[in-house]
Image (cartoon, grey):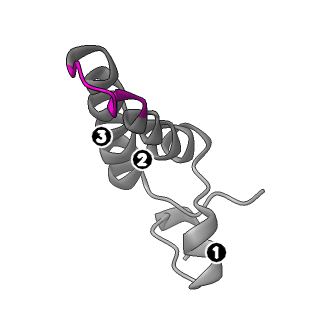
Amino acid sequence: MLVNTGVVDRIIRIVLGLVILSLLFVVKSELHWFFLIGLLPLLTGITGHCPVYTLIEVNTCAARK
């Protein structure tokens, strides 16, 4: 699995994922499980690989350009 996300992109994804996941515990409604979607940006930020970037052939990683 190739790294295709840059450092800034990864930091933004990790922060965004954590914010969305924290809403899981804050929002008290029947739809609070929807905030598990925050796992997607969190995992792509941690691994450095975005499958959507692979499909559309985008690479924000400076080392791979």
Circle 2 residue: 10
Q: Is residue 11 magenta?
A: no
Which of marks 3 and 1 precedes in the sequence?
A: 3
The residue at the point 21 percent across, 22 percent down is 27
Q: Kindly report the distance in space between the C-alpha atoms of the residues bearing marks 2 and 1.
A: 15 Å
Image quadrant of residue 35? Answer: top left
Q: Position of residue 20 (x, y in %)?
A: 30, 34
The residue at the point 57 percent across, 71 percent down is 52
Which one is in front in this view, the residue at disc 1 or the one at disc 3? 3
Which of marks 1 and 2 precedes in the sequence?
A: 2
User: Is 7 placed above or below 25 here?
Assistant: below
Tell which residue pokes out farthest to the front in this image: 30
The residue at the point 30 percent across, 40 percent down is 16
Which image quarter holds the N terminus?
bottom right
Q: Is label 3 in a helix, a strand or a loop? A: helix
Task: Report the amino acid beneath label 1.
Answer: Thr
Circle 1 residue: 54
Which image quarter holds the C terminus?
bottom right
Magenta span of residues: 27-33
Q: Is label 2 in a helix, a strand or a loop? A: helix
Tell which residue pokes out farthest to the right in this image: 1
Which of marks 2 and 3 precedes in the sequence?
A: 2
Q: Which mark is residue 16?
A: 3
